[in-house]
Amino acid sequence: MQQSHNARSPIVFDAEITNEAFSGYRALSAQTVASYKMLGRNAPDDAFPLAPLLASLNDPLLKAGALIKPIPGYTDVIVHGQKDGFAWLLDASAPQLQKSWLFLNQRTLANYVKSSGYNGGSIRLISCNTGACDAVAAQNFANKMNVEVLAPTDTVWIHPSGRLSVGETQYFNTGEWVSFFPKRPWE
């Protein structure tokens, strides 16, 4: 049964509370509350919103993720991605060759999403290349979450209006969104 989800502000995790967040920690740090205020949003008092967003405070994905318009029937999960997994940019202010990334597999991302207040239903995985034809990230995540996962086949571009496009450039929507359904190991 597909559940409908209300649109809520994305959650922001900073390095200070990362480890606690993955083990079910439900309080927000002062830095995280400040980031909500910077975006003109109110931080939740005692629970995480339904749209998990893994981004450091200086990652451009934080601001862009707040612009995304939800679609009915899906919970948005917003994280940097690649064909075989997910990544969290820990410090976007570092020079390009010195940026620190924390690479995540589907199990870690699933644990994060479940501890963020997710209550089931389909997921729109806003994560570059995770649904490409030779990618395994979206399928593995669908298997772990045991729900439909909608994922992009190429780079996701978040426009100032909140519109998303998928493709090699922001100007041409040459990619698409593909649904992945949970499979058993023998399928």
Image (cartoon, rainbow, N blue to C red):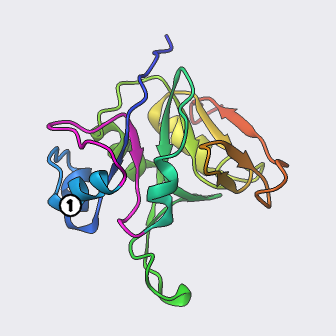
Badge 1 element: helix
Q: Nearer the viewer, residue 130 or 16?
A: 16
Residue 64 drawn at (x, y percent): 52, 54
User: Which residue is nearer to you in this view: 43 or 133?
Assistant: 43
Which secondary structure is most common in the magenta stretch? Answer: loop
Left or right, residue 1 beside residue 165: left
Q: Residue at x 20, y 49 (%)?
A: 23
Q: Any magenta on residue 41?
A: yes
162 left or right, relative to 107: right
Left or right: residue 127 versus residue 49 is right
Q: Residue at horizontal 49%, vertical 37%?
A: 76
Q: Residues within 10 Å of mark 1 (few under 14, many from 20)?
A: some
Vertical relation: 170 (above or below) 15: above
Q: Mark 1 sits on what residue? A: 17
Q: How many marks?
A: 1
Residue 122 against residue 155 in the figure, above or below: above
Percent position (x, y) of residue 120? 40, 24
Left or right of 38 on screen, residue 79: right
Residue occupying the point 24% across, 57% down: 32
Q: Is residue 53 magenta?
A: yes
Among the 4 quarters of the image, the one containing residue 83: bottom right
Which stretch did the figure color magenta? 39-58
Tell me the quadrant of the picture where the C terminus can be found.
top right
Instruction: Identify the image quadrant of residue 169.
Output: bottom right
Give coordinates of residue 51: x percent, y percent. 41, 38
94 in relation to 88, above or below: below
